[in-house]
Amino acid sequence: MSQPSQFAVFGHPIAHSLSPRIHQGFAQQFGIALEYRAIDAMPEAFAGAVRAFFAAGGAGANVTLPHKAAALALADERSEAAARAGIANVLTRLPDGRLAAHNSDGAGLVRDLTERHGVDLRGRDALLLGAGGAARAAAWSLLDAGVQTLTIVNRTPETADALADAIGEPARVHTRYWQDLANLGSYDLILNATSAGVLGNGLKLPMSLVGARALCYDLAYGPAAIDFIAWAKAAGARHAWDGLGMLVEQAAAAFELWHGQQPDTEPVYQALRAGI
Ligand code: ATR
């Protein structure tokens, strides 16, 4: 009998990663036997650990914090989404053994919003909080999905300006100062792509940002999203969602790259939702 294919997620810390569960759940749908490990790698050991994994026959890897920029840097080829975001969350082995970097986070976000939550993104005025890797991945995908305008606000304004410049659509993409949030009026769609919740720091956001029918979305999930969701609900948002669905959808996109099959994400999502 042949060995099951080898997959892994690299991060630090990584012990609580849901990725092994998600990928095993998808694999079961197709009767695919695979091994999916969580590998804790310190930043200085990351590139070596990835190369050793693929040299030993690894078929594909997910990459999470804090290695997403390093994953892009070490790859021999980059998908357009990874190059635009400046970070990668998926590595695949090319037939000649070289590595290709992909980013499925933005596609995962859009799929969660449009397919799970039934949101029509076209024509919406969106506010994106943050301009780091997660925000970069989200920004292009939201624009591709048809949001009318995207206002990027980051604590460090230069990073927001750099992202807007890189996108290069001045008629649709604007930047504003963080300290002016209270003067910006309201938005249809507000996305929290900062790492404030992950770092355990609450954001102080004005309730005036939340329009009457606003949809609020935190790209993080679990405890990291609690403050933003509570703020959105208190401000009267029509819906406030965390990023658990995005996590499952970005995994599904990686699964499709590796196995050429599109998994049914709903049962896996529901099982994880019941557990958090
Ligand atoms: P990620 O990969 O999660 O996007 P990142 O690239 O380090 O991580 O980006 C973190 C983002 O969260 C940045 O936009 C950061 O703002 P700065 O560019 O000013 O650092 C934002 N962020 C983190 N903590 C924050 C806080 N307490 N308030 C506001 N923004 C915060």
Image (tube, helix red, strand yellow):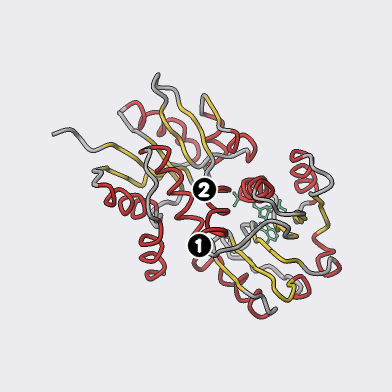
Up-down: is 91 above or below 230?
above
Left of 78 or right of it: where is 22?
left
| Residue pointed to by mark 1 | 116
Between the residue at mark 1 and the residue at mark 2, the CA separation in whole angstroms equals 25 Å
> Which image quadrant shows ligand 1?
bottom right
Left of 118 or right of it: where is 96?
left
> Residue at position x 37%, y 54% from top?
22
Could you tell me which quadrant the C terminus lies in? Answer: bottom left
Residue at the far left: name it.
1
Q: Earlier in the sequence, mark 1 or mark 2?
A: 2
- Residue 52 sits in quarter: top left
Up-down: is 138 above or below 214?
above
Left of 254 or right of it: where is 229?
right
Question: In the depicted view, which residue is nearer to us: 38 or 110?
Answer: 110
Left of 8 or right of it: where is 185?
right
Q: Residues within 10 Å of mark 2 (few under 14, many from 20)?
A: few
| Residue pointed to by mark 2 | 65
- Under circle 1, the secondary element is helix
| Ligand 1 within 8 angstroms of badge 2 C-beta | yes
- Amino acid residing under circle 1: Arg
> Residue at position x 84%, y 65% from top?
184
- Amino acid residing under circle 2: Leu
Q: Give the percent coordinates (x, y) of residue 168.
A: 78, 39
Q: Give the percent coordinates (x, y) of residue 232.
A: 65, 74
Up-down: is 55 above or below 20?
above
Residue at the far top: name it.
96
For the residues carrying marks 1 and 2, which lies nearer the camera in this image?
A: 1
